[in-house]
Structure formats: C-alpha cells, structure tokens
Amino acid sequence: MTAANTFDLDGHNKTLFVFGGSQGSEALNQCVAGMIGHFDTISVLWQTGKHNVEKYKQYESKTVRVLPFIDDMKSAYALSDLVFSRSGALTIAELTACGLPSILVPFPSAAADHQTHNARSLADAGAAEMVPESELDTDIMSGKISTLIHNENALNEMAVKSKRLGKPDAAKVIVNKILEQVRA
C-alpha cells in the first residue's frame, strides 16, 4: 500500500503535511483553514490535534485529509513534499532524518524559546523557512507554500540540506558512548 493510499489522497498531487505536534496547533490550524481554498493542485494532510478535529473536519475533501492524530508518521512523511509545522526537537529530528523541506512556525511560549532556535538552525542551513507565529497571514502563507511546493529545484535543495543535518543513528551513537563509559 502506498502512502497516498494510506491517507486516501491523490499521489499525483504535491502534498503539504501540516501538524503542530501531537496536540495540534490552533495558530497553524487557523492559518491552514484560511488557505485551503487557495490550494487547487495541492493535497493537504492535516493533523489538527484531537481537541480541534471537529472544528476543522468541514475542510475535508478529495484533496484534504483532516485527522486528529497520525500514528503512521512514516507514511505521512513519505507522502510529504513540504511540511508546515512547529519546530520541537522531535519534529526537527524526524524532518532531518527524512530529509524533508519545511516551513517552521516556532511555538512562541516554548521553554527558553527553544523552538525558535531549532527552526533558525534549519533555516540558516537552507533546509527550511522559518515564520514567526506573529507573522502568520493566510494570503502570504498560501502564496509562499504554493510557490515553494511547485518549485522542484528549491524543494530538492532544501531536502538535501535537511538530510545533511539529520542524525538517523543518534540513538546508536549515544548507546555506544554510554557502553564505552560503563566498560571503562
């Protein structure tokens, strides 16, 4: 089964994957709700968070899948051409391990503003674009997403840079370091 079949979306369209962490993000959800009408040739896989799904289920269509939570992140990432999300540490690790281009919106109330630091590190490397939550505007964002998702060269360049930042064997490296210390 393909990733497109998993989510019942057209695998021929470019796919935007939207998520704001496991709880969802009301700021991202509101922005996406305002943009949906601008995406004629883009499929959207949208994780709203379980507390918001009923509010946004009305946007479900042939090209938009609205889900409370996605357990199968492997398939979601495989389907994604561009990710629009928050920038928590696990999200950053997953995006870079998969080599995915992204537009990151840091959660402004995150401890020590770590999400901004995370997003900035990817943006500075050319692997992502960072947009502060205070600058989310549906018209500007829909234009930015539409332009980027249809620019194969830009997506490929961002993907390569994202993959370079990835540390898919990080857990193995950490375990080996611990074992070295234990044996010493």
Image (tube, rainbow, N blue to C red):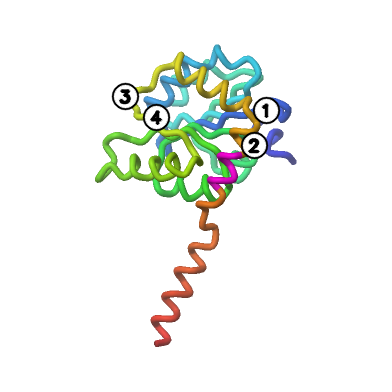
* 100 sits left or right of 88 in the view: right
Camera-nearest label, 1 or 2: 2
- Placement of the C terminus among the 4 image quadrants: bottom left
Which residue is under mark 1?
9
Q: Alpha carbon of mark 2 to alpha carbon of mark 4: how far?
A: 23 Å
Mark 2, secondary structure of its residue = helix
Camera-nearest label, 1 or 4: 4
Q: Residue 116 location in percent, x, y? A: 34, 40
Assess whether mark 3 and mark 2 are in contact (beta carbons under 8 angstroms). no
Assess whether mark 2 and mark 1 are in contact (beta carbons under 8 angstroms). yes
- Placement of the N terminus among the 4 image quadrants: top right
Does the magenta run of residues contain 160?
A: yes
Which residue is under mark 4?
131
Assess whether mark 4 and mark 3 are in contact (beta carbons under 8 angstroms). no
Q: Residue at x 51, y 48 (%)?
A: 94
Q: Residue furthest bottom?
A: 184
Does the magenta run of residues contain 80?
A: no
Camera-nearest label, 2 or 4: 4
Q: Mark number for residue 79?
A: 2
The kind of residue on which mark 3 rests is: Ser
